Image (spheres, grey):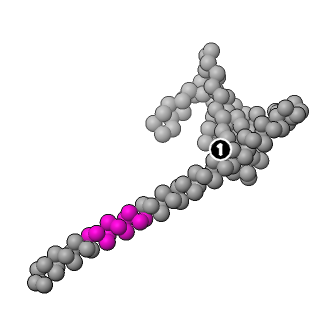
Amino acid sequence: MPLDEYRQRRTALERQRVALQRQHEQLETQVDQQQALAQVMFSLTHFCARVQCGLAQASFDQRRQLVELLIDRVVVTDDAVEIHYVLPTTPASEHVRFSDLRTDYQHRLPGWKTAGHVVPGTAGAHDVEDGVEDVA
């Protein structure tokens, strides 16, 4: 086999090896994503089944706790009401209200406490975050 042909074949094989390595890495990433998605789906299905079974016998206080778990926040503007809700995706997240984890919007709430101090209300003030203007 001539040297030039050997070099061409070797270069082609090296390109093919690199392409296969990239494909292998992509497939591994997809497998990881599919496993994570399957775990979330299992958790959600299990949570929904437990809620469905227990909802008929739940007391008012238990139903209130469920609503507090699922509702992130309620936004009222003029005559419109938006309810932002979340679903727990792991068994551990069933015991923590989502709004307790998110604090990025709480600084705009009137009377919100931080480190023992009360933050004054921001009614009528304008906040600009991430290029979006909010009127509190």
- Check residue 26 for magenta coloring: no
Q: Who's the residue at 69% across and 49% down the image?
A: 43
Helix, strand or loop for the magenta stretch, by majority: helix
Left or right, 133 with respect to 5, comes to right
Dot 1 falls on a residue whose secondary structure is loop
Residue 119 visible, this orientation = no
- Reply above or below: 31 against 129: below
Give the quarter of the image for residue 118: top right
Relative to 110, is 81 above or below?
above
**Image quadrant occupied by the C terminus:** top right
Using the image as rendered, state which of residue 35 and residue 83 is in the foreground. 35
> Label 1 belongs to which residue?
102
Residue 69 higher or lower than 8, as above or below: above
Percent of width and height locating residue 34: 54, 54
Let me know if residue 130 appears in the view: yes
Which residue is pictured at 62% across the width and 38% down the height? 105
Q: Is residue 12 left or right of residue 121?
A: left
Queried whether the magenta region covers residue 16, the answer comes back as yes
Q: Name the residue: 66% across, 35% down.
A: 85
Give the residues in magenta.
Answer: 15-25
> x and y percent of residue 77 in the render?
61, 20
Q: How many marks?
A: 1
Query: What kind of residue is marked 1?
Result: Arg
At horizontal 81% and vertical 38% (from top left) the residue drawn is 53
Q: Nearer the viewer, residue 134 or 126?
A: 134
Q: In which quadrant of the rendered image does the N terminus lie?
A: bottom left
Residue 29, given in percent of the width and then of the height, sits at 48, 60
Find residue 61 and report its image quarter: top right
Quick one: which residue is furthest to the top in this view?
79
